[in-house]
Image: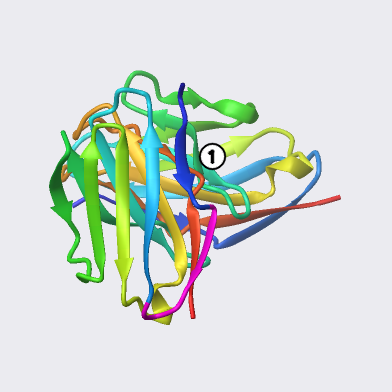
Amino acid sequence: AQSVTQLGSHVSVSEGALVLLRCNYSSSVPPYLFWYVQYPNQGLQLLLKYTSAATLVKGINGFEAEFKKSETSFHLTKPSAHMSDAAEYFCAVYSSASKIIFGSGTRLSIRP
Amino acid sequence: DTEVTQTPKHLVMGMTNKKSLKCEQHMGHRAMYWYKQKAKKPPELMFVYSYEKLSINESVPSRFSPECPNSSLLNLHLHALQPEDSALYLCASSQALGDNEQFFGPGTRLTVL
C-alpha cells in the first residue's frame, strides 16, 4: 500500500529564506506524487506533480520538488520565501485503488 | 473553464435539518469526488462517482447521501447530522477514474449545531 509521511507539522522561515518541506513516500510500484497547497479557508491547489517523466519537477509560484528514489523522498523547495507562501502544504501519493492518499500536512509560516 | 465550484460557501444547520451541498464542473470530467476535512487534518475521501455511478463509498454513515444527477453535477444530501460532522467538505473532479490529477473546489464550511 502506498503512503506518504511529512516530517514537521510546522515550519517557520524568514521572508527571503529557503523553504524546505519534507515528504517521504512508501510504495511498491513507481509512485505518482503530488504537492498541494491550501490557503486559509480555501480548497486545495495543485502545486506540482511527479509522474516519472523527470526527477526535478517545477511547479507554480516558484516551487519545485525533486524525486529521489534512493531516499524515497519528494521534498518541496523554494529558494526565497514570500509572505504569500504562508499556507498548509500537503504531500500526496496516488494509490492503486484510484485514491489520493494525503500526508498529515505541514503549516508554513513566514516571518517578516 | 478549469474550475470546480461549490455552493454554499458556508452552511450552519441543526441536527434535525435536511440540507444539500452542491458541486459543479464544466471540464468534461467523468469522475467526481467528495472529501471531508476536519480542522488541521488532511482531506479524507468519502465518495467517488464515475460516469454518474457510485464507484467508491468509504464506509460513510448513511446520514450522508451522495447524488450525481449528471456528469457535471454532484450533490451531497445531509440529514440528521451530528456536531462532529462539522468540517470543510471538498469536491473534486478528474478526467476519469484512474486519472491521477484531481481538481478541487473551494469547499463548503459546514457547522452542525
In front here: A80 or B79? B79
Q: In which quarter of the image is residue B32?
A: top left
- Look at 22% across and 41% down and name the residue there: B69
In front here: B48 or B42? B48
Would you place residue B15 above or below residue B23 in this image? below
In-image side of A56 versus B26 (left or right) = right
Return the chain for callout 1.
Answer: A
Q: Provide residue B108's location: percent of width, then percent of height.
A: 48, 55
In the rendered structure, does residue A13 fall within the stretch colored magenta?
no
- Look at 15% across and 51% down and name the residue there: B56
In front here: B113 or A11? B113
Would you place residue B70 above or below residue B19 in this image? above
**Residue A70 can be seen in this image:** no
In the rendered structure, does residue B12 fall within the stretch colored magenta?
yes
Q: Provide residue A56's location: percent of width, then percent of height.
A: 47, 24
Span shown in magenta: B9-16
Q: Provide residue B105's location: percent of width, then percent of height.
A: 46, 42
What color scheme is it?
Answer: rainbow
* Disc 1 residue type (three-letter): Leu
Q: How crowded is mark 1: few (under 14 residues within 10 Å), some or many (20 or more)?
A: many
- Look at 14% across and 47% down and name the residue there: B54
Please, which residue is most extreme toward the top here? A53
The residue that label 1 is drawn on is A76
In-image side of A80 versus B76 (left or right) = right
**Residue A40 can be seen in this image:** yes
In-image side of B71 versus A34 (left or right) = left
Say which element carries label 1: strand
- Look at 34% across and 32% down and name the residue there: B101
